[in-house]
Structures are given as structure tokens and as C-alpha cells.
Image: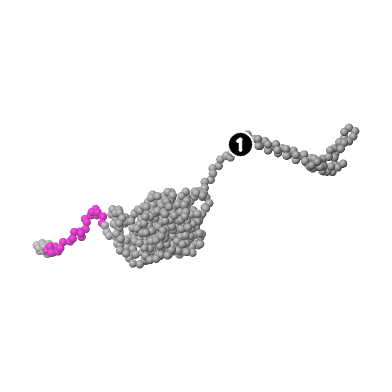
Amino acid sequence: MPPGEKAMRAIGLVAAGVLLASSCPALPASAAVPATAAAGPMTEPTPKSSPTKKPSTKPTSKPSAKPSAKTSPTPSTSAPPPVSQAPVTCDLPRGYRGAIKEPWAQKRLAFQRVWGLTRGQGVKVAVVDSGVDTGHTMLDGRVVDYTDLTGTGRKDCAGHGTGVAALIAGRDLAAQGIPLTGVAPAARLVIVKQQNADRDDNGGERLPSAIRKATDAGAQVINVSIAAAPSAALEQAVRYAQDHDAVVVAAAGNATKDDGNDGPAYPASYPGVISVASLGEDGHRIESSGLQSRVDVGAPGKDLTIPWPGGGYNPQAEGTSFAAAYVSGVVALVRASHPALHQDQVVRRVLSTADGNVGDGTGRGMVNPTQAVTAIVPGEDTLGAATAQPALHPAKLAAPSHPDAHTTDVATGVAAGAVGLAALAALCGIVVPMGKRRGWRPGRVVLGDREEDEEPIVTGTEGGTIGAHH
């Protein structure tokens, strides 16, 4: 092709390209590709199907027994939550409001028998849980300290913490015609809200801090009705509580595999923690209770009646969470009646006075409030403190006392009389045998060349002679 023709064709192609570009819309700026990687990191939304799974921390119970109709959400009236946290509203079913019979668990434990000695007065019990409804009749005025670690407000959106707290130290409602009460109604509650639902999606990251908060608030009993994975922080928090003379009571866990974790429950499995399983009326373990965890003692854990947020009750609660609450109430009774006991001594007393093992997973058996309060436990004195062994010192004889003159005269007279009686006894021992040998005849006395009869031996009275022979 001649050069001129090539030039003309090139000019035509350029013109066609310009015409085509002018007729197309411009690309959006967001579709532009950065020139270099130094422009900054790119953020991409994480697909919902592949989130990072964390171990869940869940209450070891089933508090929501499908009570009847739902209530309208109740707006929060608490203080504003921490910055960046939004208050939440609860959407719980309405609690049962009909007639209530005395629960079998309350009859079985019969803790009212020791109320003449102790009702838990002066003892603070911490409930590390989902918060509580402080407006419920059983809990009104019972809470002396409330810490919310979730930033969701002072409310219980799971119903779990309300039930646990009331079984421990709820008001006795017998005067209102409701046969329901806490084990230690004179105790006071320290509430530490560490989760806002029946499951903690953070895997228990707040639990160590919650136990430390409860300890710093002066709790003498800390109830943890939660099953979590073990961690160094959690173990250290438990030791911190024990070092500050707090008894830690925890649920042994229920055999559920919905979270893929069927191993031992913590903090229940740490040394020194009272690990609680749920038992039935016959004292045997409820089938799903405490299969993997060490069990120290048991308490009622099925067909329980607990208060429900917003008023009313849940008459079908179950699980080791509420069994642990009963044991925490008993510990409060013991701490009030035996204030000199250290936390490990309280643990020993509660375990050693239980009703006895009745099978696998029951530990020492059903907790016994009456025995826990009144029994004489070896190693404790009558005041409840451990009996101290006396220190060994060199033995010394007691110094003699200084008698007075009267005592000396009496002693001298007694001694003289004793000597006289001894002499008389000796004389009789000589004379009487001699008389017997002679047939009680007078002896013969030789005076020079003749013999004289001795005088007769007179042994009678009134001038008569006895045994005189002539």
C-alpha cells in the first residue's frame, strides 16, 4: 500500500475512535482502580456465612418455660449506658400470674427450720448473671449493688438472673398468700450483669472481670450459674475471690451439645469452687445434669417456680443454674450463723453435712440446710472457728501455797490424833493375842520366893469382870 494511502487510513481510524468515545457515558469514579497499593487497605464486608466462632458462655438452665402471652416491651428507666452502647428493650413472654403451690424443692430443703437461728442477715451474695428485675415483688429492696458490664441497662432480658437471685435471697411472700421465698431472705444481693441474653456471644470474656467486681463489692458468696470455657484469667479471678474470703458456687453444667462443647464446665471445675448438680425429689441426678464436670453437692433442679421479669412467675424452670442458687442460699445461712469460719471451712461444712451420695453425678448428695447450720463439725469450736492446738511449753509444778495459823493448828491436831489411833491399834495387836493364848487367865508374877496373881483383866462396864478366872 502506498504511504499516502496508509496515512489517510490511520487518520480515519483516529477520527472513528474519537467519535466513539464522545458517544459513550463516563465510568463512575468508584469503578476506578487505584494506581498503586499504597493508597490504603481495602475493607471488604465479611460474608455472613463464615463468621469467626467464639466459645459461648451460657446460663446452665432453661428459665423460659414458654409462659403464655407476650407483654409490650418496657422502656429502660435506668441510668444511661456507657458511651457507644445503645439501651435495649426486652421482649419476654408474660409470666404466669395464677395460684402457686409451695414448690417441692422448698418442702424438700425445709430451710425455714433454721430461720430462728439465721436468715442470712449481714451477708452479701453476688449474682453474676443476666441482671435482675429489681422491681419484682420478691426482689424489691433486696439489691444493694448493681454493676452492668454489658452497657445494656439494669434489666434482665433473659429472665435467668431474676430467678437465680430470688431463690437465693428473695423476700418471703407467705404473708401475701404466695408460698414462695428465698433460702436466705435477710441476705443482700450484689448484682453483676455480665451478659444480656441466655448466651454470651463474647465467649465469657467479661466473666473474670465480673467475678472480680463482685469480690471488690464485698460479696461473701458469689453465685456463677454460667458454664464457660477455662482460661487463665477466669482461674485467676476465682482465686482472687477465694483469697478475699468469698465462697464461689457454680453450676456443674447441663449436657447440651448445641454449642459443640460437652466438656467440663468452668468455673465449677476449679479447685475450691462448690460445683452443683441438679437433683430430683428422690435425690438422684437429673439425667442431663453435671455429666462432665466434677460434682460436689446437689440441689433441686427441675419443676421449679421462679419469679419472672415484669411480674409473675415461671413455674417450670429447670437446670443446674437454679440448683446452684439453692446452694448459694444455704452458704449465706452458714456464713451468717458461723461468721468466724473462713471460706474453705464453709465449703467443708456444706459438703460434709449433705444427705449422702445416691449415684453418679450427685457428689455428696442433696444439700441439707439444717445440718449445714447446726451440725457440730470436727475441727471447729463452738463459736464456729477452727479449734487451735495449744502451744507446747515446759511443764512446771505449781508452787505450794502459804497456809494460815488456823490451818496449821487443825493439821497438827489431825496428825496427833492419827498417831494416837495408830498406837492404840498396835497395843491391841499385842494384848489381844496374848489373852487368847492364856485363855483369858491372870498371869503369875514372881516376887522374890512367892508367886502373886495378877489383877483380873476388866473389860466390861459397871464394875463387872469379863473373862476373870480364879
How many numbered tags mark residues here? 1
Using residue 466 as the reference point, say whether residue 301 is left or right of it: left
Using residue 27 as the reference point, say whether residue 380 is left or right of it: right
Quadrant of image for the C terminus: top right
| Residue farthest toward the top in the current orientation of the protein | 448
Image location of residue 294, percent across then percent down: 46, 58
Instruction: Report whether residue 261 is seen.
Output: no
Instruction: Report whether residue 100 is seen.
Output: yes
Q: Is residue 33 magenta?
A: yes
Q: Amino acid at mark 1?
A: Pro
Residue topped by disc 1:
400
Image location of residue 272, percent across then percent down: 46, 53
Give the camera-side residue of 469 and 263.
469
Q: Residue at x 47, y 62 (%)?
A: 108
Q: Residue at x 40, y 50 (%)?
A: 218
Please say which color scheme the image uses: one colour
| Residue farthest toward the right in the current orientation of the protein | 449
Quarter holding residue 392: top right
Image location of residue 15, percent across then percent down: 11, 62
**Disc 1 secondary structure class:** loop
Give the camera-side residue of 190 and 270.
190
Using residue 415 as the reference point, say whether residue 366 is left or right of it: left
Q: Is residue 115 magenta?
A: no
| Residue farthest toward the front in the current orientation of the protein | 462
Q: What is the crowding at mark 1: few (fewer than 14 residues within 10 Å), some, or many (at least 20)?
A: few
Using residue 268 as the reference point, say whether residue 436 is left or right of it: right
Provide the residue span drawn in magenta: 19-42
Quadrant of image for the N terminus: bottom left
